[in-house]
């Protein structure tokens, strides 16, 4: 059994640390420093240390970096002779090569490797801070995560015990990882010259680059970064790369003004990095120095460095002393966002890095060697017994392998030994796969097929690579995004296969078993399909996974059932690929013309053949209706037939329904439109089913905010008391301070005191507030999902309310968790998840039967108390009635009438509220009611006990607005 990178990835994403793979790390790095660093990275908390930064540093450079961390400037400045970038100074012998780039992208890794080999520098300087920037990046670089292409997410822990509320993500193939790995291989010292991140105050939100139009600015800057990433794809020459850096940095700088960005922030960062580079140059000898800068401030950084070098009189004005970073204790590695970060990395990052290639080779050798290992006699029986026993213990198996099956397993393995000659691990594996799958009886709805279950058990028992069973189920069938190269290969091969069909079907990818078998005969397609069906056996399902991935990228359209067609984007990708092969001389001119003719004659996708774009109002209406339809069922998915029947019944009842919704084919196209926008996930396994995504909930929230002009309510929700203050002193302005931190009155006093005319005022006269951190909040949103919430779209508007409160809280860097309750209660989204993950969790909620408010409060209390810390804790309860259910254990023990159970449920809820109040946790209640006085009295009592707020709402469409008003 070949163990690949994907197997290791799954284990790590599932929360395990595979010791078998860990043993390969010393073989990859082959030096004590890197191997010890790798061992350190398997811990949950990684200590920050200057020692990690000492890789390849001599004594002078090590002292310099230690000074940066402690905030100590070099004692004096040796006079530096004028230097020109990229040119040797005859007097000093120093060469400086500036390079600006985005620090992550699909082609950044290979581009940087080529430039590093081309320049062969003696020192590399990078605009990352020593500990939180390059130090953290080194920890990721030498981790098992990086060796298999996984990111690492972490929070910064400070020495006073506090922790940053915003996690950082480090990606394989990023600038920090590429430089760290290359420098280790080539023994090149790396000097981090970036500015330490200003420690956020508790409750503070990082602005999106400080812009007034954050979303537009991000789109603009991302487009420039993507342009850079595309243009440097085939570049190996430094001069060409430098010209691209300069041209695009100018465009980026223009955008700073266009979008209202406070340019001062970039200037301060450039000034700081230039000062640290100047410190380095003061110590440098006759050396070639490559300076890798963030593209955001590349132009200013380069200009300020030249001023520091050439003009003595400017040093006093420009030079900024180091800011200490020694208050950082370490980093907490976070498991929860890993899968999300990995999906982002696969979309935006390289398909393979140098570190992954090294590890992949070692893993292949280990896999081959391990499979040939000969087992001792006692190990044979023990291994066979353990595999058989695992099949019996698995919760998804109704009947495991019998004694007779175990005997057959050993007999088949023994027969294989007769052929191969020895009891190896490979023999056990093949014997298990041949004799066990058909002997398993799985429970209905089991997430793994029998063959996949046996494969997972063999990996774990025989090779020591495996997941806990629940994690295996969680990741079952999880396919990872295609790389760009794989996408192109798959598109071309699918196009070729589609053109081999009969005339009526030429150019169409048929989603059936016969087409899948034909596609599987092609070696390249076979490899890609196998990779995408990690836990699936059927080739038709593998083809479907592949086509769905291509559809997500916009290359294929699934607007017509049972087939895929090439979109305009897919056709352009095919044309570009053919042109590249022609330019490289891989195909003749005649072959190129033939291929272009075939591509041009491909049948148009449905959405391109007729106008099907839906207006925003229609999209909002459809999403709302689809959500209400989905709430009728307990399953995660609803079929298109369910929606069609819903509309037909509604029309029969006399309701006005659009004619398009009563036409099955047109309804299918509308579903496709929603899928294309990411609002739905569609599954077609003979019956078309859909499920709403978190993006659909975000869409409904955005529409509500824009229609009700409720953006101010989002901004004001969870706002601290306006009369409270966290200002403790007045101090001089420091680089990194925001405009809001500046005290206008004290600044004016300083100007008057120094008798400075306005035109001579500099940063020296500015005075700023010294603030103490404000207290953060942990918030548990407790949502009633009882059967009554299905009525009048209450559950839909309640979900939007949860989305609105989550967004308001997350924007203020408060941690949010979500609890849902009906008969029982469960944590839907743990504390600290990002807003997208919260939306994805909430949108899947379905209504159950009764209302067990006490259980909901109890579950929310456990969620909040599991996290130790000084944060204020708050439960926000959204419900439409009083309790009428007990938890199963209490209900079973009671033989009383329904009225008695309701009374017990009432008392249980009050009791839980009192327990919560004793823990200093507030409870606020939003009651959805038509005027039921008993329910109002109960809800008021809960909020009074919990020292929180009470708000009632009768109009369901007002639920989200009322929730925000309550917390304003």
Image (spheres, rainbow, N blue to C red):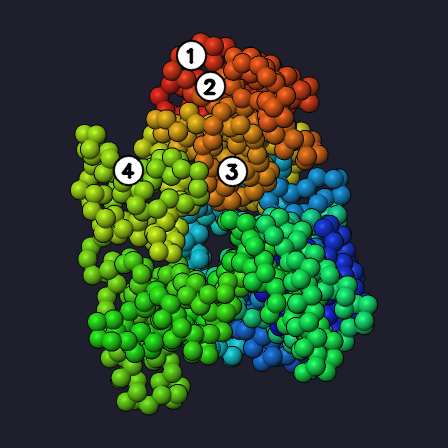
Q: Residue at horizontal 32%, vertical 42%?
A: 642
The reply to whether callout 3 and callout 4 are in contact (CB within 8 Å) is no
Q: Residue at horizontal 76%, vertical 58%?
A: 40
Q: Residue at horizontal 53%, vertical 58%?
A: 449
Q: Nearer the viewer, residue 23 or 185?
A: 23
Numbered mark located on residue 646 in the image: 4
231 left or right of 39? left
Q: Circle 3 sits on which residue? A: 811
C-alpha separation, residue under disc 3 versus residue under disc 4: 38 Å
C-alpha separation, residue under disc 3 versus residue under disc 2: 30 Å
Mark 3 or 4, closer to the camera: 4
C-alpha separation, residue under disc 3 versus residue under disc 1: 35 Å
Mark 4, Cα crowd under 10 Å, few <14 / some 14-19 / many 20+, is some
Numbered mark located on residue 881 in the image: 2
The reply to whether callout 2 and callout 1 are in contact (CB within 8 Å) is yes
Q: Quadrant of residue 458?
A: bottom right
C-alpha separation, residue under disc 2 versus residue under disc 1: 8 Å
Compared to residue 628, the image places residue 567 above or below, namely: below
C-alpha separation, residue under disc 4 versus residue under disc 2: 28 Å
The answer to which of marks 3 and 2 sits earlier in the sequence is: 3
Mark 4 or 2, closer to the camera: 4
Q: Nearer the viewer, residue 847 or 364?
A: 847
Q: Circle 1 sits on which residue? A: 932
Residue 783 visible in the shown view: yes
The answer to which of marks 3 and 4 sits earlier in the sequence is: 4
């Amino acid at each position: 059994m070949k163990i690949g990178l994907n197997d290791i990835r799954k284990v790590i994403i599932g929360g395990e640390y595979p010791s078998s793979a860990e043993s390969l790390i010393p073989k990859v790095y082959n030096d004590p420093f890197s191997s010890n660093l790798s061992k350190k990275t398997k811990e949950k908390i990684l200590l920050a240390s200057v020692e990690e930064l000492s890789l390849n540093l001599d004594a002078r450079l090590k002292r310099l970096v230690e000074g940066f961390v402690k905030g100590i400037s070099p004692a004096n400045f040796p006079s530096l002779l004028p230097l020109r970038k990229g040119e040797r100074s005859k007097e000093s012998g120093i060469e400086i090569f500036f390079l600006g780039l985005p620090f992550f992208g699909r082609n950044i890794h290979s581009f940087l490797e080529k430039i590093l080999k081309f320049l062969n520098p003696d020192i590399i300087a990078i605009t990352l801070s020593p500990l939180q920037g390059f130090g953290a990046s080194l920890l990721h670089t030498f981790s098992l995560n990086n060796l298999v292409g996984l990111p690492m997410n972490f929070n910064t822990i400070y020495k006073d015990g506090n922790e940053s509320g915003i996690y950082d993500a480090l990606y394989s193939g990023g600038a920090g990882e590429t430089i760290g790995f290359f420098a280790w291989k080539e023994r090149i010292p790396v000097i981090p010259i970036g500015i330490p991140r200003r420690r956020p105050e508790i409750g503070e939100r990082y602005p999106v680059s400080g812009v007034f139009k954050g979303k537009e600015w991000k789109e603009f800057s991302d487009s420039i970064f993507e342009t850079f990433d595309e243009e440097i794809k085939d570049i190996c020459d430094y001069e060409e790369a430098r010209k691209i850096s300069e041209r695009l940095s100018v465009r980026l700088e223009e955008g700073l003004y266009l979008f209202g960005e406070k340019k001062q922030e970039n200037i301060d960062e450039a000034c700081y990095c230039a000062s640290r580079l100047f410190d380095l140059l003061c110590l440098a000898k006759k050396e070639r120095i490559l300076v890798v800068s963030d593209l955001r401030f590349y132009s200013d950084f380069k200009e300020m460095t030249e001023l520091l070098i050439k003009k003595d009189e400017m040093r006093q004005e420009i030079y900024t002393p180091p800011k200490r970073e020694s208050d950082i204790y370490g980093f907490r590695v976070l498991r929860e966002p890993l899968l999300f970060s990995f999906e982002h990395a696969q979309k935006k990052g390289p398909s393979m890095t140098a570190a992954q290639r090294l590890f992949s080779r070692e893993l292949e050798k280990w896999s081959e060697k391990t499979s040939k290992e000969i087992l001792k006699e006692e190990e044979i029986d023990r291994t066979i017994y353990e595999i058989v026993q695992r099949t019996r213990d698995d919760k998804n198996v109704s009947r495991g392998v019998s004694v007779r099956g175990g005997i057959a397993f050993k007999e088949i393995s023994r027969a294989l030994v007769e052929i191969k000659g020895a009891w190896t691990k490979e023999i056990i594996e093949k014997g298990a796969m041949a004799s066990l799958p058909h002997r398993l009886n799985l429970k209905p709805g089991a997430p793994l097929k029998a063959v996949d279950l046996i494969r997972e058990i063999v990996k774990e028992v025989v090779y020591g690579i495996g997941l806990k069973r629940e994690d295996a189920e969680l990741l079952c069938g999880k396919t990872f995004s295609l790389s760009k190269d794989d996408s192109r290969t798959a598109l071309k091969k699918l196009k070729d296969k589609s053109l081999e069909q009969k005339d009526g079907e030429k150019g169409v990818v048929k989603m059936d078993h016969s087409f899948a078998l034909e596609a599987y005969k092609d070696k390249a397609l076979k490899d890609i399909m196998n990779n995408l069906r990690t836990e699936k056996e059927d080739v038709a399902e593998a083809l479907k996974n592949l086509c769905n991935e291509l559809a997500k990228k916009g290359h294929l359209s699934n607007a017509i059932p049972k087939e895929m067609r090439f979109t305009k984007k897919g056709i352009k990708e095919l044309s570009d690929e053919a042109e590249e092969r022609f330019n490289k001389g891989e195909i003749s001119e005649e072959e190129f013309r033939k291929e272009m003719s075939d591509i041009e004659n491909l049948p148009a996708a449905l959405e391109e053949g007729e106008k099907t774009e839906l207006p925003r109002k229609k999209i909002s209406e459809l999403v709302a209706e689809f959500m209400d339809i989905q709430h009728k069922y307990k399953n995660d998915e609803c079929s298109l037939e369910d929606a069609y029947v819903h509309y037909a019944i509604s029309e029969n009842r006399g309701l006005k329904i659009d004619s398009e919704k009563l036409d099955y084919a047109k309804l299918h196209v509308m579903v496709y439109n929603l899928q294309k926008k990411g609002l739905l996930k569609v599954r077609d396994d003979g019956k078309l089913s859909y499920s709403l995504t978190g993006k659909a909930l975000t869409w409904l929230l955005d529409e509500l905010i824009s229609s009700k002009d409720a953006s101010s309510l989002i901004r004001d929700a969870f706002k601290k008391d306006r009369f409270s203050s966290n200002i403790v002193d007045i101090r001089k302005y420091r680089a990194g301070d925001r405009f809001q931190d500046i005290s206008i009155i004290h600044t004016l006093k300083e100007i008057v005191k120094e008798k400075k005319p306005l035109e001579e005022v500099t940063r020296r006269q500015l005075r700023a507030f010294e603030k103490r951190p404000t207290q953060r909040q942990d918030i548990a949103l407790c949502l009633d999902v009882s059967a009554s919430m299905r009525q009048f779209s209450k559950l839909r508007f309640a979900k939007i309310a949860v989305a609105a409160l989550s967004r308001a809280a997350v924007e203020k860097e408060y941690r949010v968790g979500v609890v849902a309750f009906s008969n029982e209660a469960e944590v839907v989204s743990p504390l600290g998840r990002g807003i997208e993950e919260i939306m994805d969790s909430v949108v899947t909620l379905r209504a159950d039967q009764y209302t067990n408010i006490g259980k909901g409060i109890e579950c929310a209390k456990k969620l909040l108390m599991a996290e130790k810390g000084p944060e204020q804790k708050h439960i926000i309860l959204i419900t439409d009635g009083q309790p009428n259910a007990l938890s199963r254990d209490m209900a079973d023990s009671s033989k009383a009438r329904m009225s008695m159970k309701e009374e017990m449920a009432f008392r249980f809820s009050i009791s839980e509220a009192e327990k919560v109040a004793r823990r200093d946790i507030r409870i606020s209640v939003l009651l959805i009611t038509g005027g039921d006085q008993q329910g109002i009295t109960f809800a008021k009592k809960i909020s009074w006990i919990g020292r929180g707020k009470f708000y009632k709402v009768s109009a369901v469409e007002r639920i989200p607005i009322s929730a925000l008003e309550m917390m304003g």
